[in-house]
Image (tube, rainbow, N blue to C red):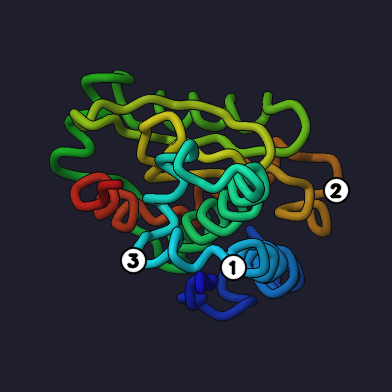
Amino acid sequence: MFNKIELPYNYEALEPYIDKETINIHYNKHLQTYVNNLNKLLEGHEDFAKGKTLGKILSDTESIPEDIRQGVINQGGGVFNHNLYFSILSPTPKKAPEGKLLDEINATFGNLENLKQNISNAAIAQFGSGYAFLVKDENGKLSVISILNQNSPLSNNLIPILCIDVWEHAYYLKYKNLRADYVKNIWNVIDWGKVEGLYMNYSI
C-alpha cells in the first residue's frame, strides 16, 4: 500500500507564498484521492506491487499489468509527483545549492538564475495541467522538462529532483489566473538542501 508523505511543516507555514487553505486541500484532498485511487487499482495485483517502490513501478510502465497500466500511470504519477512537490518546499529553505549540484547547474545553465528562469518559463508555458521538472539522467546530467497531467519523468528514465506543480488546484485559491505570480513566489519556499539530497542520493 502506498501513501502520501508526512507533511514536514504546518499548513500555514508557507504563507504568504502558498496559503494555508491551498496546502490543506491540496495535501489532504487532491493527494489523498490519488493515494486512494492507486491503492484501489492495485487490489488483486499485490504480487506485482510487492517489494517495489512507486518510483520503480513508474520507471518500467511496460511491466504494469495491462488492465491497470494507464490507471497506475495516472494515479501513481499523482502520488509520486505530489510527494516530490511537498517534500522540497520549506518555510526555512536553503536558498541556493552548493557542491556537485551547483557545479552541474553552472556547467549546464551558466548559473543558478538561468536555471530558475528556465524552470519558471517551462512552468508558466505549460498548456493545461502539469509540472515543470528539473531532472537528472543516469550520469547526473541535468535538464528542464515540462510534463502534462500526472505523467512521470521516471517513465523516460529521468529522475526528478525538483518540480513546480501548475495544476490549478496548486495555486488558484490565492493567485486565481495569475500562474506567473505563483511561479515567481514559489522560489521563496523551494529548499535547495532537499534538491541537493535528491541529486546526490536518489536513484530509481
> Circle 1 is placed at which residue position?
44
Q: Nearer the viewer, residue 118 or 70?
A: 70
All told, the count of numbered labels is 3
Q: Residues within 10 Å of mark 3 (few under 14, many from 20)?
A: few
Q: Nearer the viewer, residue 158 or 87?
A: 158
Residue drawn at (22%, 36%), measured in percent from left and top?
102
Judging from the image, what secondary structure is the residue with disc 1 in?
loop
- Amino acid bearing label 3: Gly
> Circle 2 is placed at which residue position?
176
State which mark lies toward you, 1 or 2.
Answer: 1
Q: Is residue 136 left or right of residue 85?
A: left
Judging from the image, what secondary structure is the residue with disc 2 in?
loop
Of callouts 1 and 3, the N-terminal one: 1
Of callouts 3 and 2, the N-terminal one: 3
> Circle 3 is placed at which residue position?
51
Q: Is residue 72 above or below residue 132?
A: below
Residue drawn at (43%, 29%), measured in percent from left and top?
156
How far is disc 1 from disc 3 in space, using C-alphas?
Answer: 15 Å
Residue 174, located in which quarter of the rendered image?
bottom right
